[in-house]
Image: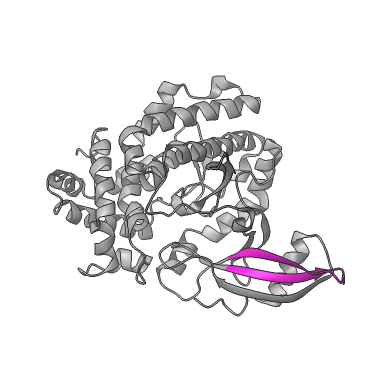
Amino acid sequence: MKAPLWISKELFEMAIRKAFDCNNVDIISFSSKDAVAVGENYTSDLFRSTITYRLNKSAKTDTISVIVKCRNEDGGAKQDIAKKLQIFEKESEMFSRTFPAIYEILGQFYTVSSKCFYTSMDPHAIIILEDLTTLGFQMVPRHIGFDLEHCFKVVEKMALMHAASVIMYEKNPSLVKHYGEGLYWDNQFAREWIGSSYNALIDACSRWPGFEKYGYKLQALGDEALARGFEATKRKLGGFHVLNHGDLWVNNMMFSYETKDNCKRLKDLRFVDFQMNVFTSPAIDLHYFIATSTKIEVKLDHIEIILDHYYAQLLANLAKLQYSLERVPTREHFKKDYNNRAFYGVMSAATVLPIVKASNRSDATFDHIVKDEGPDGFRHHAYNNDRYRKHMEHLLPYYDSFGILDF
């Protein structure tokens, strides 16, 4: 994809000026290219730009790599999603107000996210971020998913962000007013997307020997399946609420590693893509992450271990932040809330997991996942490839064990 013309010298002058608090900036040169391949991002256009610049008319020049994130303006589902869900408005709010408040509470900088250099909504929706690859961070291939070590690192960072958001909310509740609706809130687009996803899953179940009953159950639920999913998202009166990332799938996490004793070891993690944040139960991030991003063996053997690790980390972080643990749900109440919101996992497995497990294809777009029902189309491939089937062979019985697929 070619970068739009308004990704320009003038734009980078403003970004560098703001990032380095310097009024005198000269952009010597810049170049931009796609940051991710087709099928790796579904809600934004991403470009990696290399900028050579000079500050205060110095003879010395510096070069920096940044990620330029912008709203697609070519029409179609990607642009429609961005506008209806106000994803750029949310992410701009995250970087301009929410993260500064979170980092002030944590007393740490950029331990959860990347650094933001510049945001603007007018005339174009754009966010310019530090390129984490220059700091040694990288993605795990989405087809592989995370082993238990990576899962522990994810929920540790998740618990850190969640704990800080609890303190932030008590200090200034207005900081979460933009995060009332996440990826799955009741609107026309969500109903169309989730409904078509359920239909595709029902059709796929009819081809999987021994799994036809799950297709029948989903079909029997009809619109009740939508209602149960939307209900699972809602904030409950008197409940324990945190600021969820809201879109924790494989490509929205980047890891760094170090080598010790000739062995590559996991070092750190940053979350990216803060466009679906929602202030509600922490079960939302946990269900979504477990459904979309873990390896099959993790889904089979380690879900309870991950939940226990998250809960322990949440308590440890809140205690460190001097929050009264008497106001935190007990392990029993935490697990009950997780169980009660299990249909959120069903929605995640039916809508996002097939995209995660799909092959790299030129037709890997939201338009095709929702509307293309042909036997050779992307939607059919996403729901009928072996990678997706193998994960659902574990997830469908898991969710059925909660009794949530019964009418």
| Nearest to the observer: residue 11 or residue 269 | 269
| Nearest to the observer: residue 146 or residue 190 | 146
Q: Identify the image quadrant of residue 159.
A: top right
| Nearest to the observer: residue 113 or residue 127 | 113
Q: Tell me the residue at 42%/33% (across/down).
A: 306
Q: Is residue 253 above or below residue 82?
A: above
Q: Say whether residue 303 is left or right of residue 17.
A: left
Q: Is residue 57 magenta?
A: yes
Q: Main secondary structure of the magenta part?
A: strand
Q: Say whether residue 204 is left or right of residue 260.
A: left
Q: Is residue 254 magenta?
A: no
Q: Position of residue 303 (x, y in %)?
A: 37, 33
Q: Identify the image quadrant of residue 383.
A: bottom left
Q: Is residue 124 above or below residue 197?
A: below
Q: Position of residue 139 (x, y in %)?
A: 50, 53
Q: Which residues are magenta?
A: 48-68
Q: Tell me the residue at 23%/44% (across/down).
A: 393
Q: Is residue 41 visible?
A: yes
Which quarter of the figure is the C terminus placed in?
top left
Q: Position of residue 320 (x, y in %)?
A: 64, 26
Q: Is residue 120 visible?
A: no
Q: Position of residue 165 (x, y in %)?
A: 59, 38
In the current view of this chain or complex, which residue is farthest to the top?
326
